[in-house]
Image (cartoon, coloured by chain):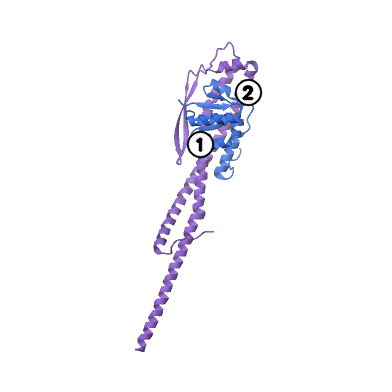
Chain colours: A purple, B blue
Amino acid sequence: MAQIIKVNPTRMELSKLKKRLKTAQRGHKLLKDKRDELVKQFLELVHKTRDLRAEVEGKLKLSHEAFAGVSAVMSPQSLEEALIFPKQSVELSPSSKNIMSVDVPVFDYKMNGNSSDIFSYGFAFTSAELDGAIQGLSDILPQLVELAEKEKSVMLLASEIEKTRRRVNALEHVLIPNLQVTIKSIVMKLDENERGNTTRLMKVKDMVLKQKDRY
Amino acid sequence: MKKIACIGDKESVLCFMAIGCSVFVVESAEEAAKILRKLASDQSFPIIFLTENFYNAMPGVLDDYSESPLPAIISIPAASGSQGTGMANIKALVEKAIGADITLNN
């Protein structure tokens, strides 16, 4: 139920409230548009992220399986020894992109090192499966980076949508109805005063005329 | 130089060492949370991959970073297999934003 805001029922307040109502309605419309567009972008992104995650998880599973195979045939020490000094390194340069005034991260990455020779070990003491496992993992790295970017964007967009939705609802269901009933009550009060004034004047006129007749 | 970090148990993250990520091997969720906080405040790791078992164990810590654009803390399945955390997360986010999961599982 809309509540009347406590203000003095004067013309001054009335025009102030009317201005506020106009601003609120305009803000409401803008925020609603913003919310709709955010939701549209969000859903597109969610679909892409879902597909990407399914793909990445599938591939990661394969590479984990390959590694499990490797650790079965190699001792943990020699496996660790083989991996501890990687030949390639990944350098990230994060920047940001603006989606409907939400800053989302964009990751550009650069692989340092020779892409044809990514193995950080001699082939003599390691099993052949290890090569395949590392190659597979190296191949999904770009997708992993993309997934990180997309999932973070989904997270940020989700909280922005929630905020915008709350604002839209607050305007629509609280502020705007409150302003409307307040304006209505002030108009009624002013009209009532006006009528009271008219009747008083008529009464006075009658009295004056009667007095005049007597003389 | 900004790099990718990986936090998780040894079997799950050792392989990431080979492709040039910074790997942090942890045993318990508390340890993982501690390292996560350290890495997040360090600013040199814009992407932090965290294995699902630890991801699920520290919702409070993750919430602290969910509003800021960096770092992106992303769950990856552990070597023991996927628990579906990543998909559940996306679903939860859709529910948070829209009120119901309207992206049909097709």
Q: Which residue does the numbered mark 2 point to in the structure image?
A: A65
**Height in image: A194 above or below B50?**
below
* A119 or B69, nearer to the observer: B69
In three-dimensional space, the C-alpha distance between marks 2 and 1, rounded to whole angstroms, equals: 30 Å
Q: What kind of residue is marked 2?
A: Glu
Q: Secondary structure at mark 1?
A: helix
Q: Position of residue B105 (x, y in %)?
A: 61, 38
Q: Is residue A202 above or below residue A135?
A: below
**Mark 2 — on which chain does it sit?**
A
Residue A164: percent from left, percent from top: 49, 46
**A22 lies above or below B51:** below
Q: Residue at x 57, y 37 (%)?
A: B60
Chain letter, disc 1 residue: A
Rendered residue at 48%/56% (across/down): A176
Q: Quadrant of the N terminus of chain A?
A: bottom right
Front in this rendered view, residue A149 or A82: A82
Are there few (<14), some (14-19), or many (20+) residues within 10 Å of tag 2? some
Mark 1 Cα shell of 10 Å, populated few (<14), some (14-19), many (≥20): many
Give SS at disc 2: helix
Residue B29 percent across, percent down from the top left? 60, 30
Question: For the point 61% across and 21% down, which residue is it?
Answer: A67
Q: Residue beneath label 1, please?
A: A153
Point out the tag, 2 or 1, that comes first from the N-terminus: 2
User: Looking at the picture, how far across and down is residue A183, in whole percent?
Assistant: 45, 62
Q: Residue at (51%, 26%) from the top-left corner?
A: B4
Q: How many marks?
A: 2
Query: As shown in the figure, which amino acid type bears the numbered disc 1?
Result: Ser
